Image: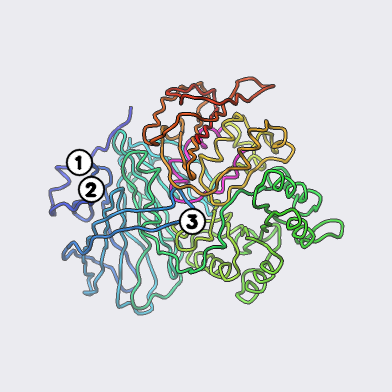
Amino acid sequence: MLKLLSFSLSLLLGTISLQAQTSPNGKITMKQVDDGFVVTYQKQPVVHLSKVGIETTNTGQGLRFEKMKRTAKVKADYHMLQGKRLHCTNKANEYVCTYRDANGKPLRLVIRLYNDGIAFRYELEGLGGEQLLQEHTTYSIPEGTRRWFQQWSDGYEGFFPMTTTGEGRRHRWGYPALMEPQAGIFALIAEANIERRQSASSLVNDGEPSLYRVFNDENKALLSGEWHTPWRVVIIGSLADVVESTLITDVSEPTQMLDTDWIQPGVVSWIYWAHNHGSNDLNIIRQYIDMAATLHLPYMLIDAEWDEMKDGNCVADALAYAHKKGVKPMIWYNSSVGWVNGAPGPKFRLNKPEDREREFAWCHKLGVAGVKVDFFAGDTQANMDYQMDLLESAARHHLLINFHGSTIPRGWQRTYPHLLSTEGVYGAEWYNNVPTFTDRAARHNATLPFTRNVIGPMDYTPCAFSDSQHPHITSHAHELALTVLYESGLQHLADRPESFFAQPQAVQQFLSRLPAVWDETRLIAGYPGESAVIARRSGHTWYVAGINGTDSEQTLALSFSRLHLRSPRALAFYDSGQKDQPWDIREITALPQQLKLQPRGGFLLVIE
């Protein structure tokens, strides 16, 4: 049974209780308590910041609170080129807490209460060549609270297992971190708007198992003048509120790019899942270019090792063939700061500014549409700056970007709209690497819509009907549903050409028309790890995708009232339950109010 938050709001609000601050819609309130804050949602306590503060080598020790005041009404109203919705709006009330340290230096804690969560950051001034030491921000998460946390790794490739304890676990946790502090009320802890001179952060519970402190990765920058942290973000509300939130981009810097017409999201044919070393073989590359042309996919990715192509061929031959077929090619690079020794190439072509400019100019000249850069080195300030260097250089040469082996999105998709996807996920390529994924994939797949994919585009590389090195036991409809269930500005299809061409014509036609841009997104049903049903609209068409994350048959209750449909007619892709004929594809004139899914099964509806 779910154990609810054990602290009593009336007791917590005793020591320094000030008048509560509220979000514009009144659902979220915050009160200062002792050294921190308590945040409530519809009068239910959901987030307890038990401590706040940040220290540099000369600032921040011995903080004392001075005052809090409301400073502004904040409105977000902007358009995206990709994501869960194209037109994003939100509102917040902004408050500023002023502190002074033992030396009298000021520190401001800027807090925004949005309609779907909170965002806060620290602002310092008068810095004189100081270094960041540590942050004291601490989330108190009582034992017994359900949570879906991922053990931190520099590539964010891990599972989000449900647990109710912080004990007996590794001590460092990556964002996003989902918890259910009250039954049916969720809070997703994340971070947004990484800028120059900033590292990214994660969570550590290196002391009490219930205390999760913000841990800033290595930052060797000397901080002078004014400086602030990234936004610490907590999305709060129902599961639908969390899944549909744009809070990560709401608090991120708008793009300064004036010309964005060249940025075109799309679907990509992808070699690696079936052929680890396929991109050094022109014959295999041609198969995937032909697949993209036949299925009308705009892009094809030439992956690692294209710099050592077999049989006297070179990458220019592959690029020329792609252009002949009307397919836009993308190519892969090793970032050469993470996995270098023993890793594939090309290497060391992007590290120096002059080399990077020369390489990207060469790509543009040969008609390369974008680059996939892989194997980064974690969340350090140096690594964040390097990725921004790559983004800014790529923009100058009109190259799309896909980061792999990389940190998670933190709002850069708004600041740099040509960043169309980021890995930062334990995705389908792991069928190629280890046997672990086979038995855990379905539950993991049904967790990602509520965790990783909430914060930004996710290059999971979905949709495989055949097997890689290790088998998958998810159904055909489950696999097809992932192409809609997961949002990514570059949606890489994992399977072999012959496998796609063996599918019914309706499946091939669906893939040919699959959007990579969505006008809006709605959560229909689901619970982390058990099931997920999401509806996404492209133009006048709704795509509804659902999966069963369990090993048992499951009946889902469905309501389509939030879609405001004029016609119930749809093309339905179901599992037949038969091994030899796995598909049940039919036109329906009434949308199902209940749907029985086979173990690890799924479905997809296309409602014109």
Instruction: Please tell me which residue is depicted at 63% across the width and 71% down the height of the picture.
Output: 356
Q: 441 above or below 398?
A: above
Where residue 489 appears, as percent x and y from the top left, is 54, 52
Local packing at callout 1 (Cα closer than 10 Å; few below 14, some 14-19, many 20+) is few
Quadrant in the picture for residue 141: top left
The answer to which of 289 and 113 lies nearer the viewer is 289
**Label 3, label 1: how many angstroms apart (C-alpha)?**
36 Å
| Residue 437 can be seen in this image | yes
The amino acid type found where label 3 is placed reads Leu
The answer to which of 130 and 183 lies nearer the viewer is 183
Q: 583 above or below 164?
A: above
- In the rendered image, residue 35 lying in the magenta stretch gets the answer no
List the residue tagged with mark 3.
Answer: 81
| Residue 172 can be seen in this image | no
Where residue 34 appears, as percent x and y from the top left, is 18, 54
Q: Which of marks 2 and 3 is nearer the N terminus?
A: 2
Q: Do the CB atoms of the residues marked 1 and 2 lie less than 8 Å apart?
A: no
**Label 2, label 3: how many angstroms apart (C-alpha)?**
28 Å
The residue tagged with tag 2: helix, strand or loop?
loop
List the residue tagged with mark 1.
Answer: 43
The amino acid type found where label 1 is placed reads Lys
The residue tagged with tag 1: helix, strand or loop?
loop
Where residue 564 appears, as percent x and y from the top left, is 38, 36
The residue tagged with tag 3: helix, strand or loop?
loop
Q: Which of marks 1 and 2 is nearer the N terminus?
A: 2
Which residue appears farthest toward the bottom when viewing the image? 128
Q: Give the range drawn in magenta.
A: 440-463
User: In front of the other: label 2 or label 3?
Assistant: 3
Q: Which mark is drawn over residue 25?
A: 2
